[in-house]
Amino acid sequence: MIDPEIRRQLRIREQDVEADVAGILSAEEQATLPAPGSATPPKTFQVGSLLKGKVLQVTATHVILDLAYKTEGVVPIEEFRDASAVDVGDEVEVLLEAAEDDAGLLVVSKKRADRMRGWQRLVEERKEGDIVEGQIIKKIKGGLLVDVGFPVFLPASQVGLRRTADVAEFMGKTVQVKIIKIDKERRNVVVSRRKLLEVEREQKKKSLLDQIEVGQMLRGTVKNIADFGAFVDIGGIDGLLHVTDMSWGRVNHPSEAVKIDQELDVIVLNVDKERERIALGLKQKTPNPWEGVAGRYEVGARVKGKITNVVSYGAFVEVEPGVEGLIHVSEMSWTKRIANPAEILKIAQEVECQVLRVDPEKQTIALGMKQVEANPWTQVELKYPPGTRVDGTVRNLTNYGAFVEIEEGIDGLLHVSDMSWTSKVGHPSEILQKGDKVETVVLSIDAEKRRIALGRKQLLADPWDKEIPAKYTVGTVVSGKVTKLATFGAFVEIAPGLEGLLHLSEITDDPIDEPGQALTEGQEVRVMVIRVDAENRRLGLSLKQAQAIERAGG
């Protein structure tokens, strides 16, 4: 047994290969390293020299060597790759790390001797371009170390055909690599596994292109995923599996259907040998679900499905795997005004629809949601016959009238001409505002066109029937206010909501070209009624005749 203190002194500290592969041998080792092709140097007991010795004893922790010196050498058992194969009498080459120490033993290293010999064999027997085999022993910055008898550097970019996320997964594996650089001065060797794989891949690609045919089913591995599809390695060449060929159903992004490194069977759809492009399909392995769809979904039939996508103009519904129909926004509700389908529908929602149209050639199905519910317009004529008084809310204003909601989703049009018996309404905003509560009467209904005509003035008796003709007879002089000037004359309000026309010729006897030469808006005037047209609801007025009567009377 070796004294613990002696064992501690003999413990060998392995040089840090991760710090610098090029400096894997110490200066002393390099100085004593035989030149390539030279004979083995004579035994010397100088530090850094290579010595050969015979195994005298094998313990659980050390191997004792006879080095033909006055004292033995001791090597830690872990420096032997297979300690169980070491026997007494075996010849072992070691490196002298330290001369006789306090314990009178030699400090030697088999591992470092192996490296020195490995380097010598490598530079003597190998050259750039040669293929060697070794075991990956360590992950270092920028790549891996491969033991080919001497640690060589395998950059991460040269490990595989594609950049590997974590090269540590190759630890412990035995690989073939190609020597791409030998730096004898720095004792540095760089190798590539990728170069060999590229050659192998090129051979496989050529063989595959010679044999591949449209319709073949091939086994492949997903290597890359893009927005438009996935690239699948089918043995030496990548084929494109387009997103539209992944499934008969909707695939929003290729990652929903396939994953990196996933193995799958694909169908060859197209081959361009000149450009080395291959189109692949996944959905083609199963029958097209659109075949016979017209027989399965007759017009008028009710179907249930799941919302797969919502867009501005409607929503897509999957009625069976691979078969979708479109619910247009106009077919979602009889009464609701839907600006965006997302207001009422969401992805994965279950809905019931009615088949409206089927086009197997274009692979489209038109669906309707509102058709599975009763159409409220079929009841409108019964609920609101002409003459019915209804309360509503002004929902919108236009130049020609106001839309009044009389129940949810049911609007009627209150035209400007039906707002007042007497006032000339230029725009509905003169009388109503959006959101106002208003009472109206139903004038007419066209259920087929979904139109209701409403009136507001019809709530009152028409004053033109008796009241106005009786009160404003021809020759009557009344007071009024100028409300509007026009090129042909002026309008004068002689009672709330009741206006008459004061023609240019009836303003003054003096010659004028426009009413503004004699009148201003808002001016108080006395006028004479000179014409009453009850049928057309018009009053003709005269300022000059009223003034003449008043002058005569005065």
Image (cartoon, rainbow, N blue to C red):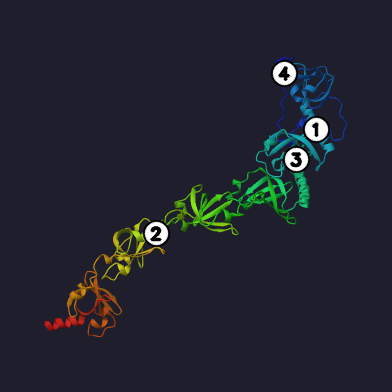
For label 4, the crowd category at 10 Å Cα-Cα, with few meaning under 14, some 14 to 19 and many 20 or more, is: some
Q: Any mark on residue 3, and which?
A: none
Q: Which residue is mark 4?
A: 7
Q: Earlier in the sequence, mark 4 or mark 3?
A: 4
Gap in angstroms between the C-alphas marked 4 and 1: 27 Å
Q: What residue did someone put label 3 on?
A: 190
Q: Which residue is mark 1?
A: 118
Report x, y in % for residue 223: 67, 45
In this rendering, the answer to whether 496 lies above or below 141 is below
User: Which three-letter amino acid code belongs to the residue tagged 1?
Assistant: Gly
For the residues labelled 4 and 2, the Cα–Cα distance comes to 104 Å
Left or right, 550 with respect to 194, comes to left
Give residue 159's quadrant in the image. top right
Q: Earlier in the sequence, mark 4 or mark 2?
A: 4
Label 4 SS: helix
Quick check: marks 4 and 1 in contact, CB under 8 Å? Answer: no
Other residues around mark 3 within 10 Å, as few (<14) / some (14–19) / many (≥20): many
Query: Marks 1 and 3: in contact by CB < 8 Å?
Result: no
- Residue position marked by numbered label 2 in the rendering: 378
